[in-house]
Image (spheres, helix red, strand yellow):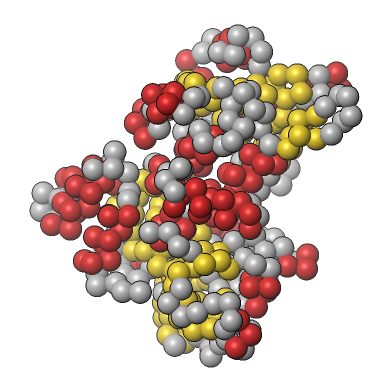
Amino acid sequence: MKTRAVRMYGENDLRLEEFELPQIKDDEILVKVMSDSICMSTYKLAIQGKKHKRAPKNIDTNPIIIGHEFAGVIVEVGKKWQDQFKPGMKFAQQPALNYKGSLASPGYSYEFFGGACTYCIIPQEVMELGCLMEYKGESFFEASLGEPMSCIIGGYHANYHTNKQNYEHAMGTKKDGNIIILGGCGPMGLGAISYGLQIENRPQRIVVTDIDDAKIQRAREVISEQQAKEAGVELIYVNTAKMADQVKELKDLTDGHGYDDVFVYIPNQKVAELGDQLMAFDGCLNFFAGPTDSNFSAKINLYNVHYTASKIIGSTGGNNDDLIEANELASKKLIEPAVMVTHVGGIDSIAQATLDLPNIPGGKKLTYTQFEMPLTAIEDFKELGKTDPLFKKLDEACQANRGLWSSEAEKILFDHYNVTY
């Protein structure tokens, strides 16, 4: 079977090509990819090429398919898995494999397995690890965004607090505590807010910082303070660039208590050091942002580590349980992955959008791989709709959903491009 895929040959060398996939083996599964959202991690891969830890050294002759936040439909099942998976079944997948200590992952390491394509082959280790899952949700884009949401959920679960009586670790963010998400008005931060409003051990307060008023305003529009209040959480957005004394003013928002759980969502030294200074007694700082500099570091107050039990951790990726939780919460409308999405495009937009990712404003770039369409900002739909009936329909669907992408908008695209599954 032929596939069209965006493949990486080297540093800043991404190519959309058509080629023949091999016949699947008895322990493999052939799938049709429907949606693939673009991750900043893929940009980091693209600019590093074979220098990236997950990339094979022979990509110049055996290129890999990029993209790991993808979902679709099963087409053909090898004999080994026919009692578990069936053609026509929708799927979601967890790309964080860690198979027998290998760093290999879809979108980074495999010649025939990645998300930026029309069809790909899922190797046996994915099924062996339980990382291929049936997906019963309404829309494919929410399954694609299940992967970044699983990373967010994994971050919440990775935090911990201690009990001085018996030193047991209480896993997760502190119930009725104070959470701060530094640099939290980007797509992942918005996902973190959405999740924080519905978790069982929800906090009393979530403070979200940024230095861009436009990003803060959009965050307010998609997740309002009133919406949080209805969930029993006080939500506060602040622009730290306008603060004379960031530590004092941010702590004052907690009546001087400080923050039980600090999430650092941008790889910035000063922001990381600010997070360290904001922790309450028994606080936990999660350095969530992934830097490209392998020597990235920041000053940490070890006095506080010793005397006030502050903890510094990092988390990256999620596990199978995190992905299952993400998809279940999205299907029940308890979280809104759509808050992340600001742009939509087709398979032809993926290569350039990936290479330009840091320079494209807004949040997640969602792509659909079964057709071609320029990468387009949702906020531009209205103007384009004055002359293009497709964008008029898409704008109406998004405006009916607070300006957010939706299952209805996805169906409009599929109908327009005659996409079936």
Residue at image x 53%, y 83%?
77
The structure residue drawn at horizontal position 40% and vertical position 28%, both measured from the top left corner, is 227
Which quadrant is the N terminus positioned in?
bottom left
18 or 237: which is nearer to us? 237
Q: Is residue 402 visible?
A: yes
* Residue 154 position (above or below residue 345): above
Q: Where, by quadrant of the figure, is residue 119 drawn?
A: bottom left
Q: Is residue 337 above or below residue 261?
A: below
Query: Does residue 59 show up?
Result: no
Residue 16 left/right relative to 416:
right
Q: Quadrant of residue 103?
A: bottom right
270 in relation to 139, above or below: above
- The x and y percentages for residue 400 are 23, 43
Q: Nearer the viewer, residue 130 or 348?
A: 130
- Please state the horizontal and vertical placement of residue 233, each as a whole percent of the image: 50, 24
In the image, taking residue 374 as reference, residue 388 lies left or right, namely left
